Amino acid sequence: MKHELKTRTAAQILVDALKVHGVDTAFCVPGESYLAVLDALYDARDAIRLVVARQDGGAAYMAEGYAKLTGKPGICFVTRGPGATNASIGVHTAFQDSTPMILFVGQVGTDFAEREAFQEMDYRRMFGQMAKWVASIDRADRVPEFLSHAFHCATSGRPGPVVLALPEDVLTGTAAVADTDPYRAVQAHPGAADIARLRELLAAAERPFVLVGGWGWNPAACADLRRFAEANELPVGCAFRFQDTFDNRHPNYAGEVGIGPNPKLAQRIRDADLVLAIGPRLGEMTTGGYTLLVPPRPAQKLVHVHAGAEELGRVYQGDLLTNSGMPQIAAALAAMKPVDSRRWRDATRAANADYREWIVRRENPGRVQMWDVIDFLSERVPEDAIMVTGAGNFTGWVQRFYRYPMFRTQIGPTSGAMGYGVPAGVAAKIAAPGRMVLCFSGDGDFLMNGQELATAVQYDARVIFIVINNGMYGTIRMHQEREYPGRVYGTDLRNPDFAAYARSFGAHGETVVETAEFGPAFERCVAAGKPSLIDLHLDPQAITTQMTLDAIRAKALARR
Ligand SMILES: Cc1ncc(C[n+]2csc(CCOP(=O)(O)OP(=O)(O)O)c2C)c(N)n1
Ligand SMILES: [Mg+2]
């Protein structure tokens, strides 16, 4: 017998669907276009926490960061045209980073559609290239179907963002319709033949190298990966901004394969005769601009395992291309009978020695020594502390010298999107209030979303924000000196007093101009009992972990 279904508005059906799919937090900037959803969220306020940001781009980054930390799709609501365009940076980041996310956007009523009504945009065209799926929910009775599809699409295979438009008249319309079951992300498994072939390739190798990263890992999968690496005595490198996939303190760790990698590590990969790429996209940043592996048929034998079938064979042909989720491949590799690894045992030790040599103390120009700052933090913060970064050269200090000890201690945009750190840091702290969250921003990077300090204060998200302040868009200045030496233009910054800025939001603010001040300032931040910020003054000459600005300019001039 069919039981009576309750009549609900589409907005209520939508919010009920969020509950069905396990959503506990949503991020938004409110808009009149989706008032009905806000009203339904009001009724659901005990089940779904609504975090209101100060800029739609901040809200979208928060949803993305929340997803990165929790593994669950990030949920974001924004208003029509202006909200959607602001939020698009978060959608693009989720796409490049393969992060599951659902962006709900208000839309003009179907009665006004296609008139270019107030703030009307065609989201299919706008988000077409940066979302896995874009749709408009045009019927109240199909809300459960659309939501179920959105969650499956965002989380399955190679995850990514989904955008759903919500026409105003549809949201207030009603239907009597059943909820769906909770979504179940679908991931492929490697076949027995795949593992047999992988083992065969590994057994025949002389100089194998394992490259890990990408979306979809979890602590158990990382543990399986470690068992595989140990049993086969393999050197393991982590892809750009996926450094927390493998314990950086492990004797098999070879370092980060990202921007400006250890030259010895880069050479080791070029010299390898077998690369096992497990999880990462073989993108520009992870392949040294397609030079560590040269497309289409790299000199090395290549095994590429990726969660998205479309990613396999996209740039590189390989000896084995396997479509698999990370827990699935890691379990199979952990269970695989180890091969004779004596041929490369010493090379694995050498790879780790190269890494350890790469992270030894080095001086940089000026009164703040970045190695000492990171070393202090490495000793001081708990093992599960979360290191959040935005984008810019300043990230190099953390990424090179901090040793990420466990899964999900690093949150950063592989898309290189500035402004990411502050909102993602706030979201990380909201997701994991018991963990210490440090957010590293550049002075340029920070002010792209510095306003989200207000959100940190409003939700008591006690992030410690560290602004690495060199008075410039340093990354671009570096490129400028390389390509157009001495012709500095458009890259200088005149900054506010960041500590006073933080205080004006109700956060704690510190200014640090020399190394010895950092530790005490950090302790005051920890003790502050509120969000805090350290304005860390870095000499502009300290442009990378390896080079000064002057040296880069001199080198460029010498080339002429
Ligand atoms: C949203 C966005 N806009 C512009 C850029 C281009 N860009 C890359 S790094 C950078 C400068 C970063 O400056 P800052 O945050 O001060 O860090 P620094 O390089 O000085 O350490 C710029 C403008 C970008 N990556 N993202
Ligand atoms: Mg800067």
Image (cartoon, grey):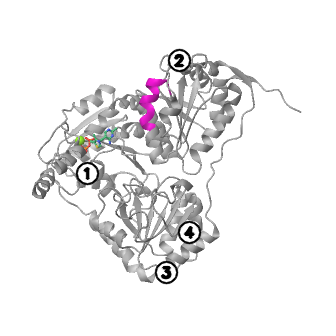
* Callout 3 crowding tier (Cα within 10 Å): few <14, some 14–19, many ≥20: some
Query: Which residue in the protein does label 2 denote?
Result: 115
**Amino acid found under the numbered disc labelled 4:** Leu
Query: Which residue in the protein does label 3 denote?
Result: 204
Task: Residue at 29% x, 25% y: name it.
Answer: 504
How far apart are the two marked residues, 1 and 3, measured between alpha carbons?
Answer: 44 Å
Instruction: Specify the label residue 373 is tagged with.
Output: 1
Badge 1 or badge 4: first in the primary sequence: 4
* Callout 4 crowding tier (Cα within 10 Å): few <14, some 14–19, many ≥20: many
Residue 61 visible in the shown view = no
**Amino acid found under the numbered disc labelled 3:** Ala
**Residues at badges 2 and 3 in contact (C-beta under 8 Å)?**
no
Vertical side of 356 occupied by 519: above or below = above
Q: Nearer the viewer, residue 452 or 459?
A: 452
Q: Nearer the viewer, residue 122 or 235?
A: 122
In x, y percent, where is residue 210? 44, 67
Q: Is residue 143 magenta?
A: no
Residue 358: image quadrant is bottom left
Badge 2 or badge 3: first in the primary sequence: 2
How far apart are the two marked residues, 2 and 1, measured between alpha carbons?
Answer: 56 Å
Q: Nearer the viewer, mark 3 or mark 4?
A: 3
Q: Is residue 79 magenta?
A: yes
**Residues at badges 3 and 4 in contact (C-beta under 8 Å)?**
no
Query: Which residue in the protein does label 4 denote?
Result: 333
State the extent of the magenta-drawn residues as a range.
78-90
